[in-house]
Amino acid sequence: MEKNFDTIITKLGTGRWNIFYLITLPYTSLMIVYHALGGAFLAPRVPFTCRPPHHHLLAANTTTLSSLTNNSISNTENPCTYLVEYGSSGDPVEEPCTHWDFDNSTFSSTITSEFGLVCGLQYLQVAYQTLYMAGNMLGSVVSGLLSDKYGRKTVIVTCSVTFTVLAIGSCWLTNIYVLLASRFLLGSLHISFTQSSYTLLMEVMGPKLRSLAGMVFYIPWSLGVVAWGGYAYLIRDWRMLQLTVSLTGLLFLPVLLVIDESPRWLMVQGRPHEALKVVKKGARWNKVSLPPDQHLLQLLTQQTEEEKPVGDGDSLFSSLWANLRAAAILVRTPRLRTITFCSGLIYFAISMVYFGLSLSGGNYTSDPFLYMALTGAVEVLGAVSVPLVTRVSRKILVIVFVLLTGASLLCLAVIPTEMEWLIITLAMAGKFAINIAFNIIILFSTELFPTEVRNRGAGTCFMLSRLGVLVAPIVTDYLVLLHTWLPSVVLGTAAVVAGLITFTLPETLNTTLYDTVTQMEQQHHTAPDTITKLEQQHHTAPDTFSQMEQQLHTAPDTITKLEQQHHTASDTVTQL
């Protein structure tokens, strides 16, 4: 069926219809960048000092304001407590602080300062970013099922509209726990409509342009990272900042009125007439002629039971359970098990490093706005990977760029904090390299899995990448409190390990991709037999050389015999 549909898409060519999707759908990756990296400016770590409460001052048996102040002082060693002198007896008593004064020189207002997310509540500051990624992880599991069951367009429309409304509405929330719940929902919706947009784009592009379209889809993300630094520099109040960036979602609403459902999905669902309607619209936009409708319908109705969606017609829970059972095939056979585990670990490590670097502006520089803008700029430069993947080994590229990232981060751990220019340079080198590695591993991993399990394999790897994203804020915001160099060491080590694991994967450039798991396993088991035959031929070679040497030694005897025969012939002639 896929070949049948690719035949139709090829006949449509590349025109206004395809280009429309190529321009509009990647905008979804721009919409979510501000929220995905929101922790950097909306809920950052902010310097603070303790402000002792008045009721402790009154307990000191004093009568004047000056004496009250003298009897209660801040604890310079621990800003989470303050010291109180009760009367004239003994040493000062350490009390837990409940009010703080925050440094507003960088940000005029943040979620951290407004809700006092420090000391005992600091885990909520980390949770602001972590819960968004947790929602991403849940959404990555459910979104594929929703998209396969209800259609790509349905998920894009529903989730993008809900995302925009919730993002705007959360600007006025006054309860921290409700705000954190909204962050979790935003993360779930984010991955749902962006993943469906990516799938729809792949399904309307011709076979030759899919790799290019897949790389182009994430370029607006990089541009959004640059813009995020600029937005935050101009608007220092967190509520106004979030409102400003959330309004960009309204620009996508007109697109929802124009896009069509994926004709490939309609075909799989047994709705060929609707698929034909979309294809004919594409032909009109591209100004091309198609075969008669009857012939197209015949192509669109050719489908087998294997090509029907898993759990079609069942409840969402049944579909989820069916997909979990179907995903078990990824660990049943030796070769596929190796690819699944190795690819999953690489995804986890690369995602953790990528988002760890994105959220580390406060760790590496005193100007987080410039840091964020620079990370976006180097991501845009990462577009050089587009021509590279068509000419250079995917495996080698991933190894080189991941190891380059690891080396940069490990060097950061030993650079003195006074050399800020060198710290930023190394951080940007690592971000540049890990961005390219991330783009390539997405293409590389999809080629590693056979066709029959490609979606399941890619989905599993993507889910593990969300787990890496979930861990990233913990590494950057918690470990830095223990040692300033610890996040760089953890992220750098993860990058090096990912590079070493990549050595275990096969190359896919200019190779025939496997269609079935059985075909891949048989090919893998055949390879040792081929090596054995080569070794046998190698051992047989000396025997062949011995035979040749014997023939060479025999050659002089043969020549001697020929000379003797020659002399005998001469004597015979003489006698005659």
Image (spheres, rainbow, N blue to C red):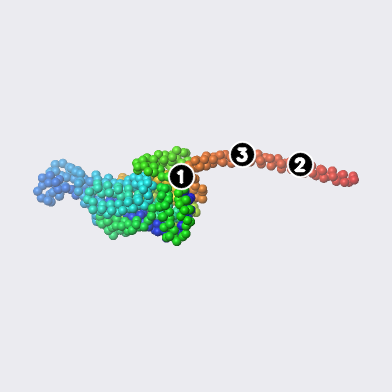
User: What's the CA distance linking mark 3 and mark 2?
Assistant: 29 Å
Is residue 414 in sight in this rendering? no
First in sequence: mark 3 vs mark 2: 3
First in sequence: mark 3 vs mark 1: 1
Q: Residue 336: percent from the left, percent from the top?
A: 46, 41
SS of the residue at dot 3?
Answer: helix
Outermost residue, left direction? 63
Q: Nearer the viewer, residue 559 or 505?
A: 505
Q: Which residue has dot 2 on it? A: 557
User: What's the CA distance linking mark 3 and mark 1?
Assistant: 50 Å
The label number, if any, that marks residue 539 in the structure image: 3
Q: Which residue has dot 1 on it? A: 304
Q: Nearer the viewer, residue 190 or 291?
A: 291
Is residue 316 in sight in this rendering? yes
Q: Nearer the viewer, residue 153 or 358?
A: 153
**Tags 3 and 2 touching, CB below 8 Å:** no
The label number, if any, that marks residue 214 in the structure image: none
Amino acid type shown at disc 3: His
**Tags 2 and 1 touching, CB below 8 Å:** no
- Picture quadrant where residue 218 is located: bottom left
Dot 3, how many residues are within 10 Å of its Cα: few (below 14), some (14-19), or many (20+)?
A: few
Q: Quadrant of the C terminus?
A: top right
| Residue plotted at (84% across, 45% down) | 569
